[in-house]
Amino acid sequence: MSVTIIDSLHALSAETWDALLPQQQPFLRHAFLSALEDSGSVGGRSGWQPSHRLWCDEHGKVQAALPAYLKQHSYGEYVFDHGWADACRRAGIAYYPKLLGAVPFSPVTGARLLGDVGAAAELLDALAAELSDEGLSSLHINFTSPACDTVLMQRQGWLERIGCQFHWHNRGYRDFQDFLDTLSSRKRKQIRKEREQVAGQGIKFDRRHGAELSEADWDFVYHCYANTYHVRGQAPYLTRDFFSLLAERMPEMIRVVFATQHGRALAMAFSLVDGDTFYGRYWGCLAEFDRLHFETCFYQGMELAIAEGLQRFDAGAQGEHKLIRGFEPVITRSWHYLCHPGLHAAVAEFLEQERSGVRVYAEEARSYLPFRQASGG
């Protein structure tokens, strides 16, 4: 068995890669990751150089894999290690390049170690042993599934980091009113008032699947998406071509909500779905309206999840404002292998304190949930 490095997912067929996936989560599919490459969203001067790691047997058959990227910066990861990089710079330690096992620009928990579990463990050990020889400071694996966590916690030298997101759970609701009935009276009235404010401004919503969108629709989607970066003086991570490629390769997993006023398009929310989860990904608007973000991104998504029988709504990173709308705190995990002994020791001490703080934060956050009786999930 040996490690093979490929700098493009096109080195493998979609059939070979997708056969390694434990479930068909959209972000890990060959269609999604190759669209990032083919659109120029990764590669080139992006600071995300595809460097996928394969564990192959003597016949060249792939037994395990890690979707991975050589990173020259820490942007677009949503697990923030800029402080570690700054400490290394001050100490004269090279932090970049580093190797990152992740889905670019996507803070979504899922499988990262693909294929056979035993082979994946062997791949991890081989990668850790070869980091220094490759001139890499570290290996990071972000937003790991429980199955990945089980493998990683059994390996030597890996440091666990936790974070907190907010997810909404569909507990068999028949419709949005059924969900509202589980909330306290005050919170129920607040959400109704927010929705009435949006409707009172003459704003209407249209929910569509990927195959129903024209190129003109995608132009609008991208305009809104890019605008969320431009207003902050930043460049968007994704290119326009990415959206067209995704629509071509996996339209059945795409959902877009459009907001219009008197026939004029105002905003959009772009999401992906799989068999049980609604993933809210990108939003943008071309004009500001009261409560438009909450309706477009949250309440429309909840209604869609209920209509399609999806069990969970993952609305992405951060956002304490999600709590009072029924999104519950969920612990996320990432794992870090740092070659420099001094850096490893310092980060280990930091993470021990951080984990304690995150757990306290998540528990306190539950007290702000709007349910008549806060529930787990």
Image (spheres, rainbow, N blue to C red):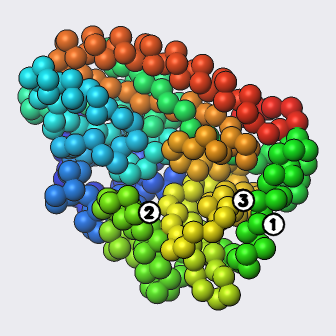
Instruction: Please state if 365 lies on the left or on the right of 27 as rendered.
Output: right
Callout 1: helix, strand or loop?
Answer: helix
Label 1 CA crowd tier, 10 Å (few <14, some 14–19, many 20+)? few
Question: In terms of sequence position, does the residue under pointer 3 or pointer 1 come before the other?
Answer: 1
Instruction: Please state if 229 lies on the left or on the right of 263 as rendered.
Output: left
Question: In terms of sequence position, does the residue under pointer 3 or pointer 2 come before the other?
Answer: 2
Circle 1 sits on which residue? 196
Circle 3 sits on which residue? 299
Going by the numbered disc 1, the residue's amino acid type is: Glu
Evaluate whether residue 217 shows in this view: yes
Please determine whether, in this image, residue 29 is positioned above or below residue 247: above
Residue at position x 42%, y 68% in the image: 227
Q: Are marks 1 and 2 in contact (CB under 8 Å)?
A: no
Circle 2 sits on which residue? 228
Please determine whether, in this image, residue 355 is positioned above or below residue 182: above
**Which of the two marks, 3 or 2, is nearer to us in this view?**
2
Label 2 CA crowd tier, 10 Å (few <14, some 14–19, many 20+)? some
The C terminus, quarter of image: top right
Residue at position x 26%, y 58% in the image: 42
Callout 3: helix, strand or loop?
Answer: helix
* Percent of width and height locating residue 285: 53, 70
Residue at position x 10%, y 33% in the image: 134
